[in-house]
Image (spheres, rainbow, N blue to C red):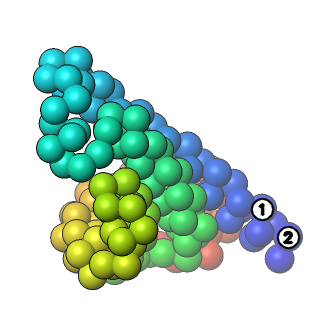
Amino acid sequence: MAKTLLRILLSAGAMALFGVLIATGLSLWALAVYANRGAAPFAHNGTTFLRAVSAYYVGGLLGGFAVGVVLPFLHGRLGAVIGGVIAVIPMYAAVAYTIEGPAGLRDWRIWIFAALLVGVPVGLGYRRMFSDWYDAAFGDDQSPRGHT
């Protein structure tokens, strides 16, 4: 039990770092937009540069952590789809909150739909990478996920 809990925490930490890496990439893209066009594109979307970058990091960190928690139990294509959607939900929730404030969280159907639309291909696209990483980190003979 303690070994499984340790694996889950290590997986969650590693995936949270991966989420931060993705947030950094998105933030660099936002910085390029800001450097090139100023604050206008952000204001047009009801936010600021700093709020957008904050949303990227909050969503990336929470999404990565959530995927890391469930990663040991996901397997196959269905598991990849579930993991992808779980990863993207916090990002869209953070963006909705950034643009609309608390009202953005109340209209959860929009960001859940967006998470399904984007999360499915994201999960399937990263499926092999995460499976290989998990098996290399913890040994596929000890994996509670089974083989895909």
Locate the C terminus and report the quarter of the image it occupies.
bottom left
Question: To which residue does mark 1 refer?
Answer: 6
Residue at the disc numbered 2:
2
Q: Quadrant of the N terminus?
A: bottom right
Q: Position of residue 135 (x, y in %)?
A: 55, 57
- From this view, report whether residue 36 is shown above or below residue 69: above
Quarter-of-image position of residue 94: bottom left
Residue 37 lies left or right of residue 132; in this view the side is left
Q: Residue at x 14, y 23 (%)?
A: 37
Whether residue 48 is visible here, answered yes or no, is yes
- Judge the density around disc 1: few (<14), some (14-19), many (≥20) Cα neighbours within 10 Å: few
Q: Rounded to the nearest whole Å, what is the CA distance between mark 1 and mark 2?
A: 6 Å
Do we see residue 80 in this rendering? no
In the rendered view, tell whether residue 36 sits above or below residue 120.
Answer: above
Q: Nearer the viewer, residue 62 or 109?
A: 109
Pick the residue in front: 84 or 104.
Answer: 104
> What type is the residue that disc 2 sits on?
Ala
Q: What's the mark number on residue 40?
A: none
Tag 1 and tag 2, C-beta contact below 8 Å: yes
Q: Position of residue 41 (x, y in %)?
A: 15, 36
